[in-house]
Image (cartoon, helix red, strand yellow):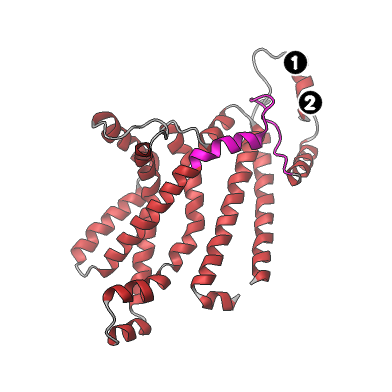
């Protein structure tokens, strides 16, 4: 098991290095200089680029950046003078994490609940209604859902606030807009896995012993039926983090997604790199944790490794 974890960490580090290389190359392909503005003359621009090391060849800049990265230095922001990228990330990650945690918990509870209901429902008509709703949730982009929720429940009905995350009520609309897709995906995974586990011999044996439906569901079926959902947790975290870019801008949430969009607009390369590396690291860790949780839930996976 330790060998497997070390292998996955090695793969994660290689993936992170490739991500850094691709992001660095893409930022260099962006037109213009991040330090260029209307009030800066050519001579001043050259001095500023020399100060930040932008006058060196791109390959040399890349290795300098990687060396600084190994020391935990993400560099200085080009637009927010005198501010470390790590400080900007630390100040903006709070709202994103709070919204992501609310959405994550809502996704698991509602998605798993709907999946169990669909698996235990014998009426094909009711299953068809549920399936149509889940298909709609997967198909419609989250920014369209966010706009509809804002217009209907925020502007017209005035049931929920639509700017910021000042109170618990502020979380409702952005969490629903961000969570509708993963809820639909988790519900479908739970349904298919639940129906498959229900056909297993040990479930039939449990029914023959006279165990109640609740005991069979939660003790014998749900534990194994949740394995695909646990595996999906890593990609779901990635979706919640990347999806927050749109949601945070629409709902004016001062999170890391909003900072990422502003960094791209302002050509703040170091901030773009820092946020990309931070999100990539979180995704790699979450995928590893999902694998480890699956190993503890199902000993067969642990033994195979």
Instruction: Name the image quarter holding residue 119.
Output: bottom left
Closest to the observer: 209 or 134? 209
Where disc 2 sits, the SS reads helix
* Membership of 196 in magenta stretch: no
Residue 95 counted in the magenta span: yes
Vertical side of 34 occupied by 10: above or below = below
Q: Residue at x 56, y 61 (%)?
A: 289
Q: Which mark is drawn over residue 51?
A: 2
| Residue where numbered disc 1 is placed | 42
| Rendered position, 58 above or below 43 | below
Residue placed farthest to the front in the image? Answer: 167
Let me know if residue 131 appears in the view. Answer: yes
> Where is residue 269 drawn, in percent x and y?
65, 33
Highlighted range, magenta: 72-96
User: Judging from the image, what secondary structure is the residue with disc 1 in?
Assistant: helix
Where is residue 152 drawn, in percent x and y?
A: 26, 34
Return the residue nearer the eye: 5 or 144: 5
Q: Is residue 235 left or right of residue 168?
A: right
Residue at horizontal 37%, vertical 84%? Answer: 202
Q: Residues within 10 Å of mark 1 (few under 14, many from 20)?
A: few
Which quarter of the image is occupied by the N terminus? bottom right
Residue 155 x, y percent position in the rendering: 28, 29
Residue at point 65%, 69% (across, down): 4
Q: Is residue 41 left or right of residue 243?
A: right
Residue 143: quadrant of the picture: top left
Identify the disc placed on residue 183. Answer: none
């Amino acid at each position: 098991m330790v060998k497997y974890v070390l292998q996955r960490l090695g793969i994660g580090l290689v993936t992170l290095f490739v991500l850094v290389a691709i992001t660095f190359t893409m930022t260099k392909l962006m037109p213009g200089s991040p330090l260029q503005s209307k009030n800066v003359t050519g001579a001043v621009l050259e001095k500023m680029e020399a100060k930040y090391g932008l006058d060196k060849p791109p390959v040399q800049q890349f290795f300098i950046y990687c060396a600084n990265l190994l020391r935990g230095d993400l560099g200085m922001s080009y637009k927010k003078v005198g501010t470390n990228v790590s400080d900007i990330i630390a100040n903006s990650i709070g709202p994103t994490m709070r919204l992501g945690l609310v959405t994550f918990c809502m996704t698991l509870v509602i998605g798993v609940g709907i999946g169990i209901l669909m698996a235990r429902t014998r009426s094909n008509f009711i299953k068809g209604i549920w399936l149509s709703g889940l298909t709609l949730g997967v198909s419609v982009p989250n920014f369209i859902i966010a706009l509809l929720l804002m217009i209907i429940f925020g502007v017209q009905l005035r049931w929920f606030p639509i700017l910021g995350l000042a109170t618990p009520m502020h979380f409702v609309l952005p969490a629903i807009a961000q969570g509708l897709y993963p809820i639909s995906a988790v519900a479908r995974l739970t349904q298919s896995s639940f129906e498959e586990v229900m056909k297993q011999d040990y479930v039939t044996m449990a029914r023959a012993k006279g165990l109640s439906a609740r005991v069979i569901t939660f003790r014998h079926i749900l534990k194994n039926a949740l394995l695909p959902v646990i595996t999906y947790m890593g990609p779901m975290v990635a979706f919640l983090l990347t999806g927050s870019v749109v949601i945070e801008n629409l709902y004016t949430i001062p999170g890391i997604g909003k900072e990422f969009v502003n960094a791209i607009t302002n050509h703040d390369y170091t901030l773009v790199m820092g946020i990309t590396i931070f999100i990539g690291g979180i995704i790699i860790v979450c995928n590893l944790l999902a694998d480890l949780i699956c190993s503890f839930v199902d000993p067969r996976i642990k033994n195979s490794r």
